[in-house]
Amino acid sequence: MPDTTAVEIAQRLGLTTRAVRAVVANKLEPHGLVLQSGVRAGKGRPTPTYRLNPEAPSLDEIAEQLGVADWTDRTADRYQRERGGFREVQRQRQARDTEDEQIAAEVYAELAEVAEQRRRDGDTTQLLEQMGLT
């Protein structure tokens, strides 16, 4: 990996230069993961350049040391649990919608029966007005 500056890293990651410098100085350099490899001269002060430490442990080794090597497995388990909960919510919504449809059908049938009774009784004009159809 070529040497790079905090500004270049910040641009690639969409972070501020200050945030990148802080992470490099407080997290990566103290743990030997990144080395300051030199400086670039330009306008103003010289800019430090960084590179990965070839002697540093791999990310898998670091994850193992920190006890997070099974992160992908734990994340997959959590995803499955959340997915199961989502499926239950969907099932409940579908049951509620089905119940609402059944109630709506019963109300409609009752209204149709009332309308038919009123039609037989000759009271359709009043019914149509009540329903806003005239």
Image: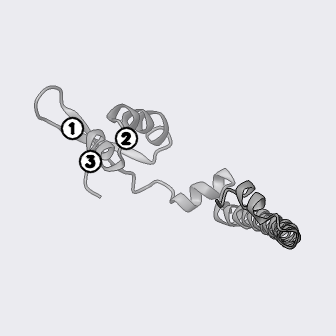
Tell me which residue sits at (25%, 50%) in the image: 3
The image's mark for residue 4 is: 3
Give the percent coordinates (x, y) of residue 38: 24, 41
Under circle 2, the secondary element is loop
The image's mark for residue 104 is: none
Under circle 1, the secondary element is strand
Left or right of residue 36: residue 127: right
Residue type at mark 2 is Leu
Which quadrant would residue 133 be assigned to in this image? bottom right
Which quadrant would residue 19 be assigned to in this image? top left
Give the percent coordinates (x, y) of residue 10: 32, 42
Residue type at mark 3 is Thr
Q: Name the residue that disc number 1 marks.
A: 39
- Foreground mark, 2 or 1? 2
Tell me which residue sits at (65%, 53%) in the image: 65
Give the percent coordinates (x, y) of residue 81: 77, 64
The residue closer to the viewer here, 106 or 72, is 106
Give the percent coordinates (x, y) of residue 119: 82, 71
Left or right of residue 30: residue 108: right
Q: Name the residue that disc number 2 marks.
A: 15
The residue closer to the viewer here, 14 or 67, is 14
- Foreground mark, 2 or 3? 2
N-terminal label among 1 and 3: 3
Numbered marks: total: 3
The residue closer to the viewer here, 41 or 115, is 115
Tell me which residue sits at (80%, 69%) in the image: 101
- Foreground mark, 1 or 3? 3
Residue type at mark 1 is Val
